[in-house]
Image: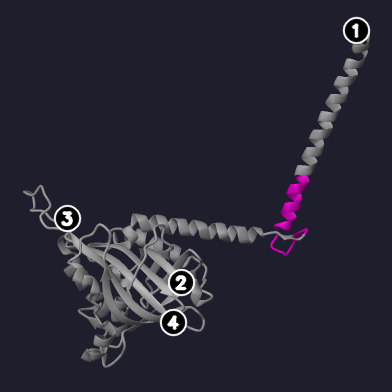
Amino acid sequence: MPSYLNRTLPLLLACCLLASVGSFQYSRGSFQFSRVDLAKSATPSATRLGSASVISETSIAENENIGTIKYNILQLGAALDRGQAYNPTSGSYYSGTMAKAKALIQSLPPAPPKAMEDLNGEWELVLSTVPHGIFRSSPFFLAIQEAFSFAENTTAFGEDKANLFFKLHELQTCSWGVSKVGRVAQRFDSETGVMCSEFDTSIFSLTVIPILGWFKLLPTFGGCVVTVSKYKLSDDMRNVEFTVDYTTSRPVEGLQGLGEWIWSVKVPVGFIWKLLPWNKGREAKGSVEHVYCDPQWRVVKDKDGEYFVYTRPVVPRSLEL
């Protein structure tokens, strides 16, 4: 090796080593400074880095907590078949799971809509805590619930009359697997003030001769039941008040209907309602209270304190009336 390399190589190696150590210390110093700087700026007090606002740790924690609550509610909605798995008529099984779901809903921070436009569009039911049928989200059934509150005696056979009615309705329509409730949804239009409530129903989904049968006995048919109402929000935007107009039906892709004639039938519920003697001329009215609303989630509460949780649909569906 040349003599000049023998003299300069150790010096070059020493310089490289010193430069590496210096760079490492500078990097560590910069990293520590960044962490301290962010920690200071993440305190709840209003701080800024240049012109950009820094989100506080409190806000981040709150958002993460709400996200966790929503995730858990969705998981319980799936586990409880949107609430249908818990039915007090059948037994108390899953009552603890439903109680947990209700507690999670109640832990959401109060957040009513800020304007009628916040409700616009389509919403799908993912969980309900009501007993005796998730179809009770329909304004038609909510109006029935409201009507019973005007009765001279609101109980019968030791039960609330409205809940007794819904229990009997469910027993008559769902016994032996006669009918099933599918998709449940609502849609709002603030320009027209019209709310459409929808639920899919299938009749004779699974029918067979017990023990002996190895084939489907009866054909399956059904459709989407649509209740059209006028609605408005209270001054504080918390309550949705509605008046039922009529009920009709629409076909569901892949589900056989009774015939083309059925889709053109409109039942004037609002008109008939006022003629019924026990309603004493009152309109088919009802209301629910918004306890939470954001661009993707809605949670409302009925007069009995039961909840309906809606989200924006993953698979939207069009509706023509």
- First in residue order: circle 2 vs circle 3: 2
Q: Residue at x 23, y 59 (%)?
A: 255
Under circle 2, the secondary element is loop
Along the polypeptide, which appears first: circle 4 or circle 3? 3
How many circles with numbers are drawn on the protein? 4
Identify the residue at horizontal 52%, vertical 71% (top origin). Answer: 111
Extreme residue in the bottom direction = 280
Could you say which disc has been placed on residue 206 in the image?
3
User: What residue span does the magenta drawing correspond to?
Assistant: 32-50
Q: Position of residue 8 (x, y in %)?
A: 91, 16
Label whose residue precedes the other's in the sequence (2 or 1): 1
Of residue 20 and residue 50, the one placed in the foreground of this image is: 50
Residue 42 counted in the magenta span: yes
Q: CA distance from mark 2 to mark 3?
A: 37 Å
**What residue does disc 1 label?**
2
Q: Is residue 47 magenta?
A: yes
Three-letter amino acid code at the position of disc 1: Pro
Q: Quadrant of the C terminus?
A: bottom left
- In the figure, 281 relative to 223: above or below? below
What colouring style does the render use?
one colour
- Mark 4, residue position: 232
Frontmost of labels 2 and 3 is 2
State which tag comes first along the sequence, 4 or 2.
2
Disc 2 crowd, CA 10 A, few/some/many (<14, 14-19, 20+) = some
Q: Secondary structure at mark 3?
A: loop
Question: Residue at label 2?
Answer: 120
User: Three-letter amino acid code at disc 2?
Assistant: Asn
